[in-house]
Amino acid sequence: MKVSTRGRYGLRAMVDIAANTREGSCVSIGCVAKRQNISEGYLEQLISLLKKAGLVKSIRGAQGGYELAKPPEEITVGDILLAIEGPMNLVDCDTKSEACSGGNCDKCATKDVWEQLSNSIMYTANGITLSQLADNYIGMQD
């Protein structure tokens, strides 16, 4: 499994938003894009996915921008990757997949291995909060 550029950039954007917003403030896409060296157009696409997942919300007006939709302690790396990448499976094991012995997944001897590995990855991703990453990021800036 390889996390795509979209997933990596989406995670970086969320860390940036968490680290650069305070109670009642928000950040513009332009500021995040500049700090993270991501094009604004690409970042807008990622923010749209994060907004649909309920992880960020937009604030209108002259001082508008984006802020987290919930506290960073309640958002995990797994939430962010799921919003950007979709389900994180190592192997497409379903009855419609050719990857599974010609669609015969019930008799696949390795199916449990792939499920356990995928579950372990998501368990780890769900155990890391955005707050932890933002604190690390802020510490690097000092």
Image (cartoon, grey):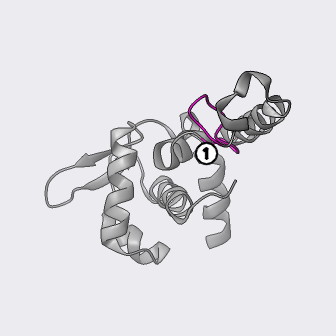
Q: Which of 118 and 13 is in front in this view?
A: 118
* Span colored in magenta: 88-98
Q: Position of residue 121 (x, y in %)?
A: 74, 42
Q: Main secondary structure of the magenta part?
A: loop
For label 1, the residue is 77
Q: Position of residue 46 (x, y in %)?
A: 39, 57
Residue at 32 percent across and 51 percent down: it is 48
Q: Which of 58 and 106 is in front in this view?
A: 106
Question: Is 92 included in the stretch rendered in magenta?
Answer: yes
Q: Where is residue 105 in the image (x, y as percent from the top left)?
A: 71, 27
Residue at 74 percent across and 33 percent down: it is 119
Would residue 142 be seen by someone viewing this image from the given angle?
Answer: no
Q: In this view, does 47 lie above or below 80?
A: below
| Left or right: where 122 falls relative to 39 | right
Name which quarter of the figure residue 112 lies in: top right
Name which quarter of the figure residue 117 lies in: top right
Q: Which amino acid type is shown beneath numbered disc 1?
A: Val
Report the residue that reaches farthest toward the left: 61
Query: What element does badge 1 sit on?
Result: helix
Residue at 53 percent across and 41 percent down: it is 82
Would residue 8 be seen by someone viewing this image from the given angle?
Answer: yes
Q: Where is residue 93 in the image (x, y as percent from the top left)?
A: 66, 35
Q: In this view, does 109 lie above or below 130?
A: above
